[in-house]
C-alpha cells in the first residue's frame, strides 16, 4: 500500500528550522500503514530535511556551522551565473539533502527519544515550502 500527502510550510530566511515530527506522524497515522517506511521530501533546491535533537542550541548551531562552512559570497559559480545571492543556499541544502526515510513500526515513526525530523530553510528569503510525505507498507 502507498499513501501520500503534501504539507505546506512558511519559512523565514536562511537558518529558519521547523520540527516536522508531529506532522509526519499525523500523515503516517492517516495512512493506516502499520509497518513500512515514511519518505519525507522537500520540493526545491534551497532547503533541507533531516533529523536532529530539536532544541534551541542545535537550532542555532546547525545554521551557524553551515554559514561558516559555506558562507554567503559572490565568488560562487552560481552567483556569477545568476547574481541572486543564494549560491551558498544551494550548497548547504545539497550537503544536507532534500529527503529523509524513516521506518514505520506499529503505525508510528521509529525515531529515538531525542530524534526529531526537521526542515531547514537555506535560502536568503522567506519561502512557501511544499513537503511531500509518502508512506509505503502494510
Image (cartoon, rainbow, N blue to C red):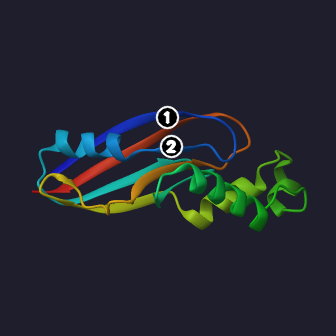
The spot of residue 53 in percent (x, y) is 46, 58
- Label 1, residues with CA under 10 Å away: few <14, some 14-19, many ≥20: few
Using residue 73 as the reference point, say whether residue 35 is left or right of it.
left
* Numbered circle sitting on residue 18: 2
Q: Quadrant of the C terminus?
A: bottom left
- Asked if 131 appears above or below 97 in the picture, the reply is above
Count of numbered labels shown in the rendering:
2
The image shows residue 58 at horizontal and vertical percentages of: 58, 57
Q: Crowding near pointer 2: few (<14 within 10 Å), some, many (20+)?
A: some
Which of the marked residues, 2 or 1, is nearer the chain's N terminus?
1
Q: Residue at x 51, y 48 (%)?
A: 119
Q: Quadrant of residue 132?
A: top left
The disc at residue 9 is: 1
**Distance in Å between CA atoms under marks 2 and 1:** 9 Å
Direction from residue 7 to residue 44 in the image, left or right? right
Marks 2 and 1: CB-CB under 8 Å? yes
Q: Which label is found at residue 24? A: none
Q: Residue at x 56, y 47 (%)?
A: 44
- At horizontal 61% and vertical 67% (from top left) the residue drawn is 95
Say what secondary structure mark 1 lies in: strand
Q: Position of residue 75 (x, y in %)?
A: 90, 62
Image quadrant assignment for residue 87: bottom right
16 left or right of 69 in image = left
For marks 2 and 1, give the one nearer the viewer. Answer: 2
Q: Of helix, strand and loop, which one carries label 2?
A: strand
Report the front residue among 59 and 82: 59
Would you identify the image quadrant in which residue 93 lies?
bottom right
Residue 118: x, y in percent?
47, 51
Q: Is residue 25 left or right of residue 100?
A: left
Amino acid at each position: 500500500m502507498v499513501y501520500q500527502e503534501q504539507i505546506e510550510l512558511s519559512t523565514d530566511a536562511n537558518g529558519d528550522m521547523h520540527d516536522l515530527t508531529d506532522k509526519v506522524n499525523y500523515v503516517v497515522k492517516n495512512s493506516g500503514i502499520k509497518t513500512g517506511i515514511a519518505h519525507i521530501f522537500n520540493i526545491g533546491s534551497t532547503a533541507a530535511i533531516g533529523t536532529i535533537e530539536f532544541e534551541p542550541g542545535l537550532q542555532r548551531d546547525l545554521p551557524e556551522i553551515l554559514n561558516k562552512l559555506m558562507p554567503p559570497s559572490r565568488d560562487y559559480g552560481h552567483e556569477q551565473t545568476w547574481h541572486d545571492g543564494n549560491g551558498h543556499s544551494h550548497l548547504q541544502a545539497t550537503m544536507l539533502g532534500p529527503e529523509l526515510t524513516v521506518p514505520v513500526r506499529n503505525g508510528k515513526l521509529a525515531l529515538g527519544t531525542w530524534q526529531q525530523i526537521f526542515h531547514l530553510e537555506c535560502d536568503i528569503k522567506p519561502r512557501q515550502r511544499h513537503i511531500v510525505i509518502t508512506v509505503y507498507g502494510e
